[in-house]
Image (cartoon, rainbow, N blue to C red):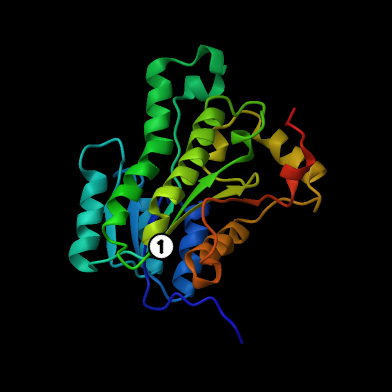
Amino acid sequence: MEILDLAGRKGLVVGIANEHSLAWAAAQHFQSAGAELAVTYLNDKAKPYVEPLARQIAAPIFLPCNVAAPGELEAVFDAIRTQWGRLDFLFHSIAWARKEDLHGRLTDCSAEGFSESMLISCHSFIRMAHLAEKLMDKGGSLTTLTYYGADKVVDHYNVMGPVKAALESSVRYLAHELGPKRIRVNAISAGAVQTRAASGIEHFDALLNESLRDAPLHRLVESSEVGRTALALASDHMTAVTGEILYVDAGFHIEGMAFH
């Protein structure tokens, strides 16, 4: 029997907000496959929601990580270096935009709001790649989350569309640069899933209904399906896959239709 085995592997999961997070689905599959995980939480307000989950998967490293706060991301990698001395894979699942920019037109987005969204949602992945490179001397896997709105216009996705497009382009450039070190870089483009992050998008129920109607499989995506894809990317089963945007959306993206 062939199985996905991460026994002995060390991984970092950034972006768990609660039990509905796609990052939590990924963490569960990583842990079930035998990996040891470092888990982060945004701040003291988020900690009570994430700490029980970290305990559930026996995460030996559990630290705050607000990528906009100076030094917090570096402290996470310092702890990994001190405790493990290496890192085998990383899962990045953080995105943010000011409410007025997320709910308003891109035409009206402020420079400050655009910069903040790009810093948190895109450049944080680049920073993590920079820090992880030093700990992946035997190769590794970096995975982030994106969405169909990076490629096609999705009503109400607004500023996050160009920000996610920048993230997808960054995946390709990072894959090119880190490939010689056997570090693979990929993104999962997840279909519409009811998460805390998704709840910030206006008329999200309409997006769910459009997905259910127009996706070839005529169903919504389950968070566990995204988690299993993350597991596959972190495993030795996909060692020749890098620079890719893997759609886990019940086939919605092939229809070439924007949400309305």
State the image coordinates of residue 61 (x, y, percent, origin top left): 27, 62
Q: Quadrant of the C terminus?
A: top right
Q: Residue furthest front?
A: 180
Percent from the top left, x then y, of residue 208?
Answer: 71, 41
In the image, 189 versus 31, the foreground residue is: 189
Identify the residue at horizontal 49%, vertical 77% (top origin).
5
Image quadrant assignment for residue 69: top left
Q: Is residue 155 left or right of residue 145?
A: right
Report which residue position mark 1 lands on.
Answer: 182
In this rendering, the answer to whether 8 lies above or below 172 is: below
Residue 15 versus residue 227 in the image, above or below = above
Image point (21%, 59%), residue name:
79
Q: Amino acid at mark 1?
A: Arg
Image x and y of residue 44, in percent: 29, 44
Q: Which quadrant would residue 165 be assigned to in this image?
A: top right
- Answer whether residue 52 is visible to the viewer in this image: no
87 or 109: nearer the viewer: 87
Q: Is residue 133 left or right of residue 34?
A: left
Residue that appears at 41% across and 21% down? 113
Does dot 1 land on a helix, a strand or a loop? Answer: loop
Q: Quadrant of the N terminus?
A: bottom right
Report the residue that reaches farthest toward the bottom: 1
